[in-house]
Amino acid sequence: MTTSAPAATPTARISGTVLLFGGLSVALVTLVVVSAGTGQLAISPSEVVGSVLHRIGIDAGPMPAHPEGDAALWNIRFPRVVMAVIVGASLATAGALMQGVFGNPLAEPSVVGVSAGAAVAAATAMVFGLAALGTWTVPALAFVGGLVTTLLVYALSRAGGRTEVVTLVLTGIAVNAVAGALLALLMFLADTQAREEIVFWQLGSLNGTRWDYVAVVLPFAVVGIGVAMLLSRKLDLLALGDRAARHLGVDVERLRIVSITLVALLTAAAVAFCGIIAFVGLVVPHLVRMVVGPGHRLLLPASALGGAVLLVAADLVARTAVPFAELPIGMLTSLIGGPVFFVLLRRTRATSGGWA
């Protein structure tokens, strides 16, 4: 399969790209300010901006009128919003990277077992009451579980010093199936409380995010997204096919190893603290590709920006849709992502004959 986008003139594509980056940037800033000020303790956008300006030493704008407003912003709201930005950008970048490496529009991080491995490891900690690292136990095990599963998929699919894409995908399906069975077994063994914890973790949530969680995930996101940008030219050459890419000087095997490692780091770090958040890595790159085209030099940063916007918006809806309750954010992204992906499939089939 190959990724394709509807044809567009160069001028229209440049205009669309400028509008996309500008629109996403404005949308992200707006959503961050609105999301930070929304909650049981309402804080106006001007007070949110004023609080930020005062923190960075600029004496401008009003401070929150409520005595607890500033503390609520910096201890609860901002860590959560920043985590949403980081996780959304990480998952969308990982998805674009996967689709570029596999040349397959249906590829997403879960193909290599990151999410399934993280879920099994997190469920193990919940069922057996593991607490060696205190509150960090579940995120740490989820991170390790995601990485180990990815390495296992890669090792099992490698033969004769090479890794075929089809073998890797099929191995990922098999390992995901085994992980699903292990997860079902753990839920069978769990008591009612642990079973509820597992289900809630799998549905995804940003509730309870703290600055020290952000400090752990941020380096992985910065390094992962940064290195992915550096690979953009090689990913473009890989889109010509393995043989053509090798003739043009690309070490295809090394590129796949580095890319899969980046996907594992980005996704494992994201799901470790937030649980399973589906469809961001699958849908966002498709939407962005329709505007900027298949070139990874623009596709990767635009996907990161789009993923951040989507997850901040989804988290805002999750917190406010039901009074005094919070919807699982993974459920929301699936509810949005599933129909959007179906529309994309129909649109691609109608305009360019579908993905061959």
Image: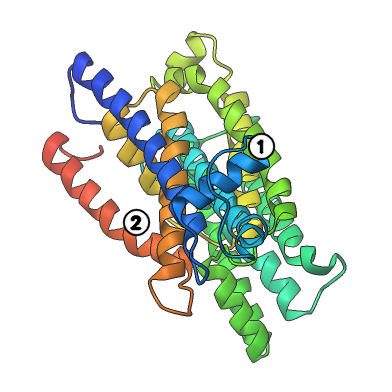
Q: Quadrant of residue 199?
A: bottom right
Apparent side of residue 57 relative to residue 40 in the rendered image (left or right): right
- Residue occupying the far right of the picture: 132
Q: Is residue 322 above or below residue 76?
A: below
Apparent side of residue 207 relative to residue 286 in the rendered image (left or right): right
Q: Residue at x 32, y 23 (%)?
A: 18
Badge 2 is on which residue? 337
Is residue 236 visible to the viewer in this orientation of the structure? Answer: yes
How far across and how far down the image is residue 61, in percent?
53, 43
Q: Is residue 311 above or below residue 103?
A: below
Looking at the rendered structure, the kind of residue marked 1 is Ile
Front: mark 2 or 1: 1
How far across and how far down the image is residue 275, in percent?
58, 63
| Depth check, front residue: 92 or 122 | 92
Quarter containing the C terminus: top left
How far across and how far down the image is residue 139, in percent?
71, 61
Apparent side of residue 287 relative to residue 112 in the rendered image (left or right): left
Q: Is residue 178 above or below residue 57?
A: below
| Depth check, front residue: 50 or 136 | 50
| Depth check, front residue: 57 or 348 | 57
